[in-house]
Image (cartoon, rainbow, N blue to C red):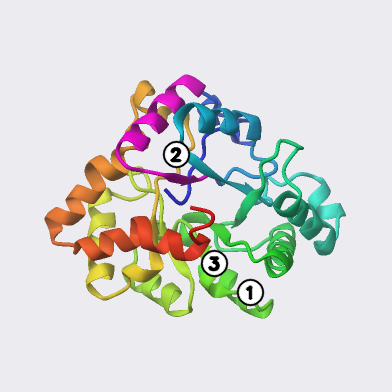
Amino acid sequence: YMHEHMKLDLSGIKKDEDCRLDCYEQTKSEVSELKEKGVSNIVEVTNIGMGRDISYVIKLMEETGMNFIFSTGFYKDPFLPKYVMDKSEKELSKIMEGEILRGIDGLGAHAGIIGEVGTSLDTITPSELKVFKAACIAHNNTGVPITTHTTLGSMAIEQIEIFKEYGTNLDKIIIGHTDLKGDAQYIKKIINLGVYVEIDTIGKENYLSDEKRLEMVHYLCSEGYSERMVLSMDITRKSHMKAFGGKGYSYLLDFFVPQLRKAGTREEDIQNMLKNNPLKIFGSDVL
């Protein structure tokens, strides 16, 4: 799973307690279930300012046997720490590099990815641009991948323009939430620029129906694009969890993947999205 949150708190800005994902026992149960279903790695994209709790996730690792890849960086407006505007791009990049090279909060865990760094709907604010530039610097100095947030799929092309300007390795760039545009041709355009795309809001039918997601993913695979696609669910609310009436993390494997097979998507394409592409992005020493 390439884009998930185990513990997250966006409730203050959103003024919605459902956006405080902090239900340890329920999360542990679902992660254990994923482990039993063959999932070995989860990219935990909660970063600075999003309610990140490394000790919480380390405990999950120890009690479930799941491997988590930790994240560094900053999210998007209005969730950015106030000091983002005060610090330079280089200063922000040094914070990220420190968490990659020296570890996070002295807990022995090192960040293995920068992200999710985000942009707003149809625009990139000055603070977001600064974070993107800092992420590029940190990436160039460490080689770790970058994963992004696009608001409803917008500004993906503009994000890639920043990455190209800074000479990043596009084989290590993952553009997030691209499914939310509901436009397979847009996704093809993004992939053709040399990056990976995430179909990572599977199950969030309040944004887009899974019928449409399935149709897009099957079409893109049939067009030969599976080597640049990865999948996830981006669970961010208590109400997304099974214990609280939601679909839960395993919905991707229990429903979405079987429906792809039913539609005739080749097994090779499914393995690319779930296994081979993450391995290419991170390498076998991480996964």
Residue 201 is marked as: none
- Verify whether residue 205 appears in magenta: no
Q: Which residues are magenta?
A: 24-44
Residue at numbered disc 2 = 235
Residue 173 is marked as: 3
Q: Nearer the viewer, residue 239 or 175?
A: 175
Residue 168 is marked as: 1
Magenta: predominant secondary structure element? helix
Q: CA distance from mark 1 to mark 2?
A: 28 Å
Mark 3 is on which residue type?
Ile
Is 194 above or below relative to 2? below
Mark 1 is on which residue type?
Thr
Q: Nearer the viewer, residue 181 or 135?
A: 135
Q: CA distance from mark 3 to mark 2?
A: 21 Å
Number of on-image labels: 3
Q: Residue at x 68, y 52 (%)?
A: 73
